[in-house]
Amino acid sequence: MSLPRNQILVGDALDRVRELPDASVDCVVTSPPYFRLRNYDHDNQLGLEAHVDEWVSGLRALLTEVRRVLVPTGTIWLNLGDSYSTKPAEGAGRKSLLLGPERLALQLIKDGWLVRNKIVWAKTNTIPTSVADRLATKHEFIYVLEAPWV
């Protein structure tokens, strides 16, 4: 199979990664949809699940395929932002941080990933927030992951 090079692969990320051969990718840099923050108007999209743990499960499935295509020295740079619960059915009490990135990181450790770094991306020029009962969110996390080859 000829690998696509220097081109953007368009489509469902899980489907597109499944088309790639084992151990064929050196590095993945991605910012998947955050939980409940944006609607891309696409069926079965990541980010609009009913519960944050369903979002974690969808990303775990994708990252299982990413792990398969990484070379032994490969890394993934995973940019994740958190969101606030609007109702307990999403995974935490109303107005609570859902801790989605942390929930995902803990599951990835269970899957065998090594969390090599947790980088704080401090955003100095954010859009003003209209929320008056908490501090403005001016950061996101970038997790640098390795999949050990045993």
Image (cartoon, helix red, strand yellow):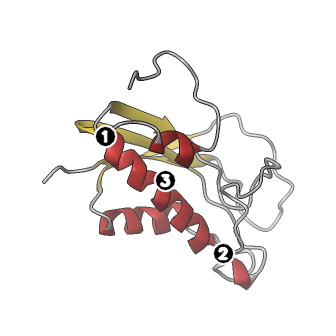
> Which residue is drawn at the image coordinates 53% and 39% (left, top)?
16
> Which residue is drawn at the image coordinates 49% and 15% (left, top)?
6
In the rendered structure, the answer to whether residue 82 lies left or right of residue 27 reads: right
Q: Compute the Cα span from label 3 to label 2.
A: 18 Å
Reading the chain from its start, which is encountered first: label 1 or label 2?
A: 1
Q: Residue furthest left?
A: 150
Q: State the residue in front, 16 or 1.
A: 1
Q: Are marks 3 and 1 in contact (CB under 8 Å)?
A: no
> Which residue is drawn at the image coordinates 49% and 53% (left, top)?
62
Q: Compute the Cα span from label 3 to label 1.
A: 14 Å
Classify 59 as above or below 89. above
Mark 2 Cα shell of 10 Å, populated few (<14), some (14-19), many (≥20): some
Reading the chain from its start, which is encountered first: label 3 or label 2?
A: 2
Q: Are marks 3 and 2 in contact (CB under 8 Å)?
A: no
Point out which mark residue 51 bears.
2
> Which residue is drawn at the image coordinates 72% and 73% (left, top)?
50
Please identify the quarter of the rendering in which residue 119 is found. top left
Classify 39 as above or below 29. below
Please identify the quarter of the rendering in which residue 13 is found. top right
Point out which mark residue 22 bears.
1
Residue 124 lies, in percent from the top left, at 64, 35
Which label sits in the foreground, 3 or 1?
Answer: 1
Identify the image quadrant of the N terminus: top left
Please identify the quarter of the rendering in which residue 2 is found. top left
Q: State the residue in front, 23 or 123.
A: 23
- Mark 3 = which residue? 62
- The kind of residue tagged 2 is His
Which label sits in the foreground, 3 or 2?
Answer: 3
In the rendered structure, the answer to whether residue 117 lies left or right of residue 33 reads: left
- The kind of residue tagged 3 is Leu
